[in-house]
Each structure stands twice: as C-alpha cells, then as structure tokens.
C-alpha cells in the first residue's frame, strides 16, 4: 500500500474504534425523550434524572464496592503468586503461568455458569456475595499476575545475594529491593483489576443475587426495555469514572499498564 | 525444622492462596458442570436424580442446535478474519510507523478496552438501529428510501464484535512485529527480493505466533460473547452463548444448559487446535 493510503486506512480504523464511544457521550446530552437524530437541542437533563434514579445509584455503589473488594483480594493473591512464579517456581514455571492465566483463557460464559451451579451445590447460592466476588477475583487475577511478573522481569537474583552479603535480613531485602521493583506492577495490576471488575458483565449477570445488580447489569436490563438518553448519561458517567482512574494513574504514578 | 525444609516450604506459602482459589472456584466448578451435564432434567427443580447421556443425544439429534453452533462458529470465524485484515495494518503502523503520534494511537487502540462491553454494544445500537445515526444520515441525504437492515442480524453482530475484540488482535500482532528486526527485511531487499516477497517470506513467518495468538483470542472471545449478540441480535438472531444463558436464566434447565455450554466450548477448543495445527504446517511448507 502507498503511504498516504496506508495512513488513511489506519485513521479510519481509529475512527471506527472511537465511533460508538463518542456516539454514546454525544447522545447523553440529547434534550429529547428519545434518541433522535439530529438531537433536539442540548441539555444535561438526563444526568439530573440519572442522579435521582435510586436503582442506578445503588448499582454504581454495588459496582464500586465489589470492584474494591475483588481488587484487594486478587491484588494480594496475584502478587504473591507472581513472586512465587518469578523466584521459586523452578521447573513448575510454565504450569504456574498457565494456571494463573486459565481464567482468561477459559470462556467467561462457561466459567460464570460453572460458578453459578457450584455456589448452589455448596449451599450458599446467590444470597451472599461470595459467588460474585469469587468470580470477580478469578477474572481479575490474571491481570495482576501479568503486571506484577512483568515488573519483575528485570529482577536479578544477584542483587538479593549482594544485599544478603551486606547483612540485610529477609524482611529488609524484601522491603528495600523487591517492593520498589514490584510497586508499579502491583498498582498497575490492581488498577486494571478494578476496571475489569467494574465493567464485567457475564460473571455478575449469572451470579447476582436479588438487589445486588452491578452497573453493567442494570444498564443492560434498562436497555432491553427503554430507549431514553438516560442510558447514555449513565454510560458517560461510567466512562468518565474509568478515565479518571487511568489518567490519575498515568500522570501521578507514571505507570505503564501491561495488558498482555 | 531444618533450614532446607524451611526453604522448601516457605515459598509455597506464596502460591498457596492462588492454588486454593483456583482449585475451589475454578477446578471444582468445572468438574461440577461436567457432572451436571449428565444429570436428568428435573420436574420443578433444576435437575433430577440419576444420570443420563440424554442431554448430549438430544443435542446431536436436534439439527436446530447443531445449526446454531455452526452459526456461532461462522460468526466467530468471520469476526476473526475481519479483525485480522483490519487490525494488521494498524499493528504494523504502531510497531514500525513514525513516532510522533504513536502514544496517541496506542491509547486509541487501548481505549475500547477501558469502556464496558455493555456501553460499547449500546453505542452500536445507536449507530446501527433502523432509526439510528447511520440510517438517519443516509435517508436525510436522500441516498436511501428505507433504512438499511444493519441491526437484528448477523451483519450487525459481526460489526460490533469486530469493534469489541479488535484490540485483542492488534496488541499481540504489534508485539510480534516489534520483535522482527527490520534489518532482516533490508537484507532480503538487498538480495533482490521485492518488498512483497520480503514481507511474505521474512516478516510474515516471523510474526506468525502473534497472528496466531490474536486470532485464537478473538475467536474464543467471540464464541462466548453474550452481551453484544444479545443487544444487537435481539430476538431474531441468537448465538449459542445467548441461547445457553437464556436457557439457564429463564427455564432453569441446568443439565441441558450445561451440556450446551460444554458442547460450544469443546467445539471452540477443537477449532483452535485445528487452526494452530494448520497454520504451523502451512508455514513449515512455505519455508523451503
């Protein structure tokens, strides 16, 4: 392909990637009762409606709460597993990696269904949030693992040995050598875990109890029967929440998030 | 406890929580769902007493479900192929292109991943609907009289799935291209190969692992996608994942739903294995 044609092609793909997101944001300011084109003037009225809608506000709180709990658990477990993987796994390295990535490789819909039956089989059902949180921890675990183990790639065992020869005990070595190395990976992985958990649908949809709908579920239910721009307002707020998390992490912490 | 023993057990504490979590909440549920798929249907309960292979014979006897699996595989295949064609040039540009806007372009490729799948599918319903942005614009310009059927069909599902999964194609291919030394191409060119030949014989075989990874990811993800086919396909076009979830949520046929979900996953896994074999063989043949 000639260079200008090639560039144009790529620009079109970028436009394609952005189009549906921009359309949602644009639609949220539609003043009309329905999503009509061209919009009947601009107005923040659907944001006002949304902020007074208890169902959506409760769903946002549930989502944030589930994402926070899942992030803390999977951040801890995933970091520990990554430390084991890099330093101690030895000949089990490949097995550990595959096991840790398994939730990502298995179809999410099958995992969700399997978990649903399992929580009923062990008798807790969906009356508690255990099933949903376990599901969220499962699907976010690979991202913590990938990020933390990537940050340890540059780790050289001789640094640890040098510190030991200089008299540092185990705790000091961890605090002064390991922790600074893995910190960006842990924070990056946790942020990604939070975003994935906040946005995930299938796991939450299968494992939700009564009154524990997360924001994506509530939005999905709403979209099946309603066509007002309120859904667009909800979506825009959700996008902005995620963007704030990402921008803060990029600017303040200067992180590079590894997705793969 | 001896020092050696402490050294052996200590690190295991690090992996233990992950092992317990994966064992209890992944391995056991998967074993359970396999058992569930052999249970008898219940009367008013999710499943009955005793075991049967009836769920599987029902699946293979009913052409409706076989057709639906074929349809789902077809949608997955088309989505993967389009993602590859659309994504490869972008991956190339990101890996080799001019540096000025690379950070921005990379951000653009990542951005869909940061927006929930429900929201992205919703965006496509706004664009593709009969009274959606595209149809309204085209009728407004007098190009069409009646709205184009963009939604509630396989076309709409594929368009939206390509959007949802394109980053999963671009990122691994980009990583693979970055791993190919541009000097190899120059060497081929200096030995008289045309640009196309150098690309086909040198670059393409070397970034095949990235292409494979991208294709497998997109294919598997589109097979198990629920939200997009459900919102875009509506009631008219159903993929297997939608049928399975609806069967479980609406009718509580657990054994039947388990069998369907497993059959879809196994077929998908088989396709992936066949694909991996075929592509590897092809490149072996291509290299003299």
Image (spheres, grey):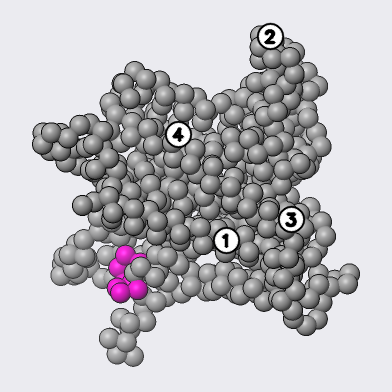
Specify start and end residues of the magenta stretch as a single range. Answer: A85-92
Q: Mark 3 points at which residue?
A: B64
Q: In which quarter of the image is the N terminus of chain A?
A: top left
Give the distance between the C-alpha atoms of the residues marked 4 and 1, in whole angstroms.
Answer: 26 Å
Labels 3 and 1 touching (C-beta < 8 A):
no
The chain that hosts pointer 2 is: B
Closest to the camera, between mark 3 and mark 1, is 3
What residue is at 53 percent from the left and 46 percent from the top? B77
Q: Is residue A135 magenta?
A: no
Q: Name the residue under label 4.
A: B86
**Which comes before the other along the chain, label 2 or label 1?**
2
| Label 3 chain ID | B
Q: Are marks 4 and 1 in contact (CB under 8 Å)?
A: no
- Residue at the (22%, 37%) spot, across then down: B198
Q: Can residue A201 be seen in this view?
A: no
User: Which chain does the numbered disc 4 sit on?
Assistant: B
- The residue furthest right is B44
Alpha carbon distance from label 2 to label 1 = 46 Å
């Amino acid at each position: 392909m000639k260079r200008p044609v090639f560039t144009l092609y790529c620009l079109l793909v970028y436009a394609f990637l952005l189009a549906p997101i921009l359309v949602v944001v644009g639609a949220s300011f539609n003043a009309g009762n329905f999503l009509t084109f061209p919009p009947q003037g601009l107005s923040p009225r659907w944001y006002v409606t949304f902020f007074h809608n208890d169902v959506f506000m409760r769903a946002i709180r549930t989502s944030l709460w589930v994402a926070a709990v899942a992030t803390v658990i999977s951040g801890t477990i995933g970091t520990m597993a990554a430390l084991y993987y890099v330093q101690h796994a030895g000949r089990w390295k490949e097995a550990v990696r595959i096991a840790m990535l398994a939730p990502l490789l298995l179809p999410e819909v099958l995992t969700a269904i399997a978990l649903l039956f399992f929580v009923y089989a062990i008798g807790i059902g969906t009356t508690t949030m255990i099933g949903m949180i376990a599901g969220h921890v499962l699907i976010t675990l690979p991202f913590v693992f990938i990020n933390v183990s990537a940050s340890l790639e540059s780790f050289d065992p001789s640094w640890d040995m040098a510190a030991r020869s200089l008299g540092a005990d185990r705790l000091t070595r961890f605090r002064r050598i390991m922790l600074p190395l893995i910190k960006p990976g842990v924070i990056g992985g946790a942020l990604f875990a939070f975003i994935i958990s906040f946005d995930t649908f299938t796991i939450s949809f299968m494992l939700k109890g009564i009154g524990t709908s997360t924001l994506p579920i509530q939005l999905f239910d709403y979209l099946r029967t309603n066509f007002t721009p309120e859904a667009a307002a909800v979506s825009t707020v959700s996008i902005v929440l995620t963007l704030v998390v990402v921008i803060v992490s990029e600017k303040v912490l200067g992180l590079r998030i590894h997705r793969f | 406890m001896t020092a050696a023993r402490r050294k052996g057990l200590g690190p295991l504490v690090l992996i233990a929580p992950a092992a317990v979590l994966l064992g209890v909440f992944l391995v056991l549920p998967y074993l359970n769902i396999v058992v569930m798929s052999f249970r008898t249907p219940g009367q008013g309960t999710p499943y009955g007493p005793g075991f049967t292979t009836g769920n599987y014979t029902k699946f293979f006897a009913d052409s409706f479900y076989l057709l639906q699996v074929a349809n789902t595989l077809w949608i997955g295949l088309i989505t993967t192929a389009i993602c590859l064609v659309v994504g490869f040039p972008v991956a190339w540009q990101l890996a080799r292109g001019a540096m000025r806007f690379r950070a921005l372009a990379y951000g653009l490729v990542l951005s869909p991943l940061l927006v929930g799948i429900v929201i992205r599918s919703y965006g496509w319903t706004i664009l593709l609907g009969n009274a959606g942005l595209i149809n309204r614009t085209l009728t407004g310009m007098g190009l069409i009289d009646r709205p184009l059927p963009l939604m509630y069909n396989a076309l709409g599902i594929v368009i939206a799935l390509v959007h949802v999964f394109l980053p999963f194609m671009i990122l691994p291919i980009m990583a693979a291209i970055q791993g190919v030394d541009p000097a190899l191409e120059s060497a081929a060119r200096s030995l008289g190969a045309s640009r196309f030949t150098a690309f086909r014989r040198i670059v393409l075989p070397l970034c095949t692992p990235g292409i494979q990874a991208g294709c497998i990811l997109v294919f598997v993800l589109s097979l198990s996608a629920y939200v997009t086919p459900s919102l875009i396909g509506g009631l008219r076009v159903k993929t297997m994942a939608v049928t399975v979830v609806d069967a479980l949520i609406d009718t509580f046929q657990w054994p039947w739903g388990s069998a369907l979900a497993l059959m879809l996953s196994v077929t998908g896994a088989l396709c992936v294995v066949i694909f991996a074999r075929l592509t590897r063989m092809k490149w072996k043949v291509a290299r003299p």
